[in-house]
Image (tube, grey):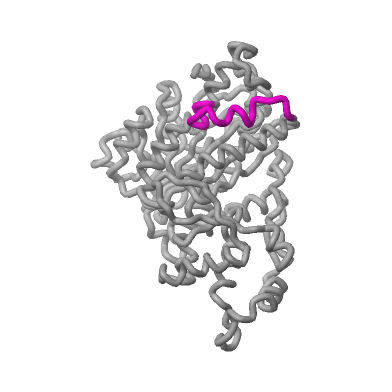
Amino acid sequence: MVPTPLEFVEDAICLSGLTGTKLKCSVIGGYYPFWWSITSGGGSRYHQFPTAIVELNAATGEVYIEDTGETVLGSAGHAINLKVREQPYSRNLKVVLIEEHPGCYDHLKTVIRLRWPSISIDEIEGPITSNSSNIYLLSKPLDQALEIIGDLDLGNALYFFDPLRSVEYANIENVAGRRIPTFFKAGTELIIFVFTSDWFLGREDFAPLPITLEESDWTSGERNTVLEADDLFGSTEWRSYILNSNPIKDREEALIELYKDRLRRWFRYVLPMPFNPKENQVFHLILCSNFETGVRATRDLYSSRTGNPRYSPDNRSAFRKFRQLHPEIFIGLVANRRPLQWRILWRIIREHEEGVCDCMCKDLIGIEPNFIRRQPLLDWLEENEYLERVNIGNAWGDPTNQFKLNWTVLKQRLGVDPPPPLIPLSPEDV
């Protein structure tokens, strides 16, 4: 992979041509406090649960916006600002900043000294065993940095991949493999920044993907881009779906869908949030999580910021139709008690991104704690065609059955539509 040359304005990194940078920084700056307020237990529990924000491409903490000539906080800057601003409530929040580029690292230290003088640089880049600040600064390759912080109690952790160009899938495997040892274990979220349209439009130092599978027809620049996409997906299987002459919009959608399939190896829920910083340019922030309620809350937050409607299916109408269709499972229930089949079905409809589920989902365990009784409830929903079995596969080779909602049946029988597609956020929405 050819490294992208970096430019700085004072201590801020200048990302020439990336017109969505300010937009991205604004969204991340709002998302970090939102995520922390949920995973730390919130104010009612005094934010007591350990949490961590891990910046894997911390850069300098500041970004210079060429279009407007202004300097704004980058994602790493927002993470530190949250930590400092929310003291003492943020005492159990760890902020880990990893930046391998020497120039970025030096500027990052200067930004911290100037903006947050109470932070000791000597302490945060020193041995973790003598660091009481819960801020950690590392100028190491990813493997080494993850090894160093491996002994820290990160608690619920959010990892942000914010590359200058693209994320190698091997790095995602590295993080997920360390953090998720068992079948879709919750407590780890990733946000991955993807320059979606750049793969098809190119930019100054980056050729667009070719429109043919014939390697002999590729230019040297196109060949380099294909190899970089191989690293993005961690395989070459994507090529037959994307290297064609279909409309760019269709190929962009195919890229995101294929990438979601790869990420589902480690995560039940993959939520791509689209952004449209200027005409024809699209990028995505992709949230990966095994915590259904957090993903739903994130979708709702994104919707509220962008004018997308919140997903609010009609519970009362759907339940009335369900009861008419399945009176046998209501026998013996008193007052307003709902059968477990209904409670599980509605939870999946309302809370589970894309209707993905399995018997080990935490919220379904809350409805029926006993596995011996819980799995037959999902089997009943499958037998009655509300769920369809899917073969997504997972990183652990676990044979647990996974399902997705059958939206066609839900619409026909209960009048329930799936959530509408998300419309991209544009600069006018910020």
Q: Is residue 84 visible?
A: no
Residue 29 in picture, x, y percent from top left: 55, 44
| Relative height, residue 96 to residue 371 (above, below) | above
Seen at 67% across and 50% down, the residue is 305
| Relative height, residue 401 to residue 254 (above, below) | below
Q: Nearer the viewer, residue 226 or 122?
A: 226
Residue 122 in picture, x, y percent from top left: 30, 33
Q: Where does the magenta region start and end?
A: 230-246
Quadrant for the C terminus, please.
top right
Seen at 65% across and 36% down, the residue is 254
Classify residue 71 by image quadrant. Answer: top right
Q: Nearer the viewer, residue 121 or 98?
A: 98
| Relative height, residue 218 to residue 96 (above, below) | above
| Relative height, residue 302 to residue 42 (above, below) | above
Seen at 32% across and 33% down, the residue is 125
Residue 429 in picture, x, y percent from top left: 71, 44
Q: Is residue 235 magenta?
A: yes
Left or right of 424, for residue 1 = left
